[in-house]
Image: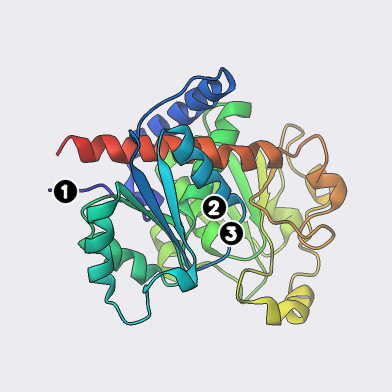
Amino acid sequence: MTVRHYLSLMDLSAAELRQIINRAIEMKRQFAEGQRIDLFKSQTAVMVFEKSSTRTRVSFESGIRHLGGSAIFLAPNDSHLGRGEPLEDTARVLSRMSRMIIVRTGDHARLETLAEYASVPVVNALSDFNHPCQLLADLQTWFEHRGDITGKRVCWVGDGNNVCHSWMNAARLLNFDLIISSPSGYDPDPELLKACQSYVSIERNPLVGVKDADLVVTDTWLSMGREQEKVQRQKDFEGYCVDKTMMSRASVEALFMHCLPAYRGMEVAEDVIDGPQSVVWDEAENRMHAQKALMEFLLASLDTH
């Protein structure tokens, strides 16, 4: 039996990605109208989180409940993941007891091992390499406000991190231009950059990078596990705060996104994140609806086998 997993945006075709985005928009409308979808049919999804979370945990647990199921949440001390039991065995056991395994971890290779041995879908709720669920919400938000993103110009300002990697994959799937404005030493993965070179470019100066951008995106400079680098990173990212001056160089219709949590006054100015171009709160809410659409898509593929 072949099971569909979601470890990266590249696990989807462009058509499937658009299908999920459009379904997420429809599910958001259905939720507002009070419609219920019993997709999980009183079954469970297991959430194995080795990293702390606010939006990811709440959006998945709420979404699973909206779909008629229950979520079993396992924090780092609640499971044997990485504490003696082989990942292969964990995958086999959890597959017998649930319809889906949702994992938030550091090492992306652990996700790949779980997916190799699981007989139910494995979902990447964040790894050190990418964050594909965040991109579903981001793209849904863009589609809601501006329509299709093909041919648009997106500027990423900040660290070439896991969310940046997922934006790179989105660019090559949906055919838009992504300009990454990061200081030297904070570039995205070189192999991924090479794979995306037809759609992605590096521009050190963020004031140049955002010029005529249709969308400006940033993230915290202090990713989980790197808090000890705060002082150095504040120095290295001087001039990379998305403020009104920077946004004024983007298209007059440009939107601003941030996956949160935001450190106001560091990577983004308060009057930008709370300003009229910001769609951050729609973006946060859409995590729930985009993930519901993803889970429906993965379970449908499971049911066909």
Q: Are marks 3 and 2 in contact (CB under 8 Å)?
A: yes
Looking at the image, which residue is at 53% across and 41% down?
A: 62
Q: Are marks 2 and 1 in contact (CB under 8 Å)?
A: no
Earlier-in-chain disc, 1 versus 3: 1
Rendered position, 70 above or below 200: above
Earlier-in-chain disc, 2 versus 1: 1
Looking at the image, which residue is at 63% across and 28% down?
A: 145
Amino acid on which the number 2 mark rests in the picture: Arg
- The x and y percentages for residue 304 are 17, 35
Rendered position, 135 above or below 289: below
- The x and y percentages for residue 224 are 61, 70
* Mark 2 nearby-residue class (10 Å; few <14, some 14–19, many ≥20): some
On the image, numbered disc 2 is attached to which residue?
57
Q: Nearer the viewer, mark 1 or mark 3?
A: 3
Residue 258 or 65: which is nearer the viewer? 65
Amino acid on which the number 1 mark rests in the picture: Thr
Residue 253 shown left or right of residue 288 in the figure: right
* Mark 3 nearby-residue class (10 Å; few <14, some 14–19, many ≥20): few
Looking at the image, which residue is at 48% across and 30% down?
A: 24
Residue 278 or 37: which is nearer the viewer? 37
Q: Is residue 196 visible?
A: no
Amino acid on which the number 3 mark rests in the picture: Ser
On the image, numbered disc 3 is attached to which residue?
53
Rendered position, 56 above or below 220: above
On the image, numbered disc 1 is attached to which residue?
2
